[in-house]
Image (tube, grey):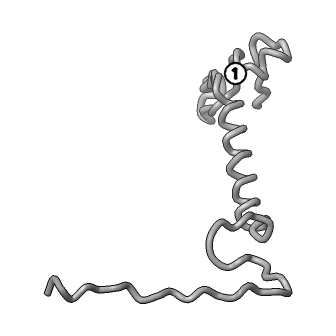
């Protein structure tokens, strides 16, 4: 029933998105001589696949590579055997002369 083909059929044109893919989209069971043909041209398919791959890699990195990320503020992710002394914050100085 459905044997899609590409025009022109050169292999390198398929990767660049410069082809038309033609396939049968539907058919009428009451009239077997009638069918609907779909013609598809998608020049940006490679960009969409690359973007999807980057999203998948980002989600993988977010959940599975979290312990290996460099932390910039706060406590270290993996504390070492020797812990530095914690600094205490001093209370802010409030001037009473303005009151």
Taking 47 as reference, is 57 above or below it?
Answer: below
Which residue corresponds to mark 1? 22
- Residue 66 in percent (x, y) is at 75, 68
Numbered disc total: 1
> Which quadrant is the C terminus positioned in?
bottom left
Measuring 76% from the left and 18% from the top, which residue is drawn there? 6
The single residue placed furthest to the front in the displayed view is 97
Measuring 38% from the left and 85% from the top, which residue is drawn there? 92
Instruction: Tell me: 44 left or right of 11.
Output: left
Taking 11 as reference, is 80 above or below it?
Answer: below
Measuring 18% from the left and 86% from the top, which residue is drawn there? 97
Measuring 67% from the left and 32% from the top, which residue is drawn there? 47
> Which quadrant is the N terminus positioned in?
top right
- Residue 12 in percent (x, y) is at 83, 16
- Residue 21 in percent (x, y) is at 71, 22
Element marked by disc 1: strand
Badge 1: residue crowd in 10 Å (few <14, some 14–19, many ≥20): some
Instruction: Tell me: 92 left or right of 67.
Output: left
Where residue 73 sits, quadrant-wise, is bottom right
- Residue 81 in percent (x, y) is at 85, 87
Instruction: Tell me: 95 left or right of 25.
Output: left
Where residue 93 sits, quadrant-wise, is bottom left
Q: Is 94 in front, or is 14?
A: 94
Q: Is 94 in front, or is 18?
A: 94
Taking 49 as reference, is 82 above or below it?
Answer: below
């Amino acid at each position: 029933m459905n044997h899609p083909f590409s025009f022109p059929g050169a292999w390198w044109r398929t990767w660049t998105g410069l082809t038309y893919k033609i396939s049968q989209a539907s058919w009428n069971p009451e009239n077997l001589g009638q069918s609907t043909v779909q013609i598809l041209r998608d020049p940006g398919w490679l960009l969409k696949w690359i973007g999807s791959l980057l999203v998948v890699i980002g989600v993988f990195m977010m959940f599975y590579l979290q312990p290996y990320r460099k932390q910039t503020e706060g406590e270290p992710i993996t504390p070492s055997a020797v812990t530095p002394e914690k600094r205490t914050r001093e209370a802010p100085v409030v001037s009473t002369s303005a009151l």
